[in-house]
Amino acid sequence: MGLPPSEHDPGSIRDLADQILSQARYDEPAQSIPDRIMGWLGDQLTKLLDGLVGGGGGAVVAWAILLGAAGAVIYLLVRHGRITMLSVATDPQPEVMVELTRTAREWREEAEVLEGEGRWAEGMRCRHRALVADLVRRGVIPEQVGRTAGEYARDVAARQPEAAPAFSAATELFEAVWYGGAVTGPAEAERFRDLDAQVLAVRV
């Protein structure tokens, strides 16, 4: 037994379907710019690969274009977050270099010259190096170049704990001025000299 004949005209049904499907909600979503570029590059790479097989001078040009396209692809991937670049690890504490060829007295003499010229931050750096040099001479800090201020503080705390509070305060003052850009002048220089004297007053 067959189906009853349709009461609607097939042509009208097709027109109605076309009208419905022409609405914006049924449109295919537009590709993003990166996706369109990637698609275009894919088509071009396919053509280039065909040219590479042929060899000859055209192959050299094709290779050059291929390398340029690969660079563009990498740029797009990085630019739009599809490749996460590894961040370079940074040292949370800057190194405090010790020049063992100079004595603590020479460092302090240079500090006085710099302070006389109004170069207070550089003078404090010299005073900090003088204090470290004195502690190296006393055997409180190992005679080793390139260690951090935090390592110096741990050495003093372990080998001369009575001097640790004053040394830590002197280190914080130095780092705030030299690395933190804090304003410094005669008052800060005098404060560092007092802390320096407190550290060296502790007998080993």
Image (cartoon, grey):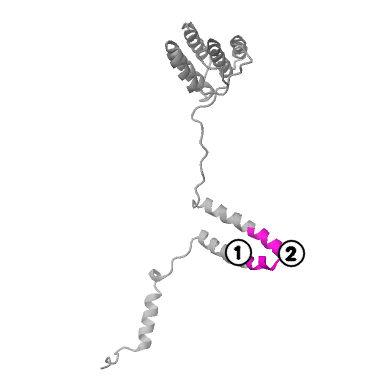
Q: Nearer the viewer, residue 51 or 31?
A: 51
Q: Nearer the viewer, residue 132 or 28?
A: 132
93 shown above or below 173: below
Give the secondary structure at mark 2.
helix
| Image location (x, y in percent) of residue 25 | 38, 69
User: What kind of secondary structure does the magenta stretch mostly adopt?
Assistant: helix
Quadrant including the N terminus: bottom left
Q: Is residue 21 left or right of residue 199?
A: left
| Image location (x, y in percent) of residue 53 | 66, 67
Give the numbered dot on residue 57: 2
Give the secondary structure at mark 1.
helix
Residue 29 in sight from this viewpoint: yes
Q: Is residue 192 left or right of residue 11?
A: right
| Image location (x, y in percent) of residue 2 | 27, 93
95 shown above or below 193: below
Q: Nearer the viewer, residue 54 or 95?
A: 54
Residue 169 in sight from this viewpoint: no
**In the orientation shown, which residue stands out farthest toward the bottom?**
1
Tell me the residue that label 1 is attached to: 45
Callout 2, which amino acid?
Gly
Structural crowding at the residue carrying mark 2, measured as other residues with C-alpha within 10 Å and reported as few (<14), some (14–19) or many (≥20): few
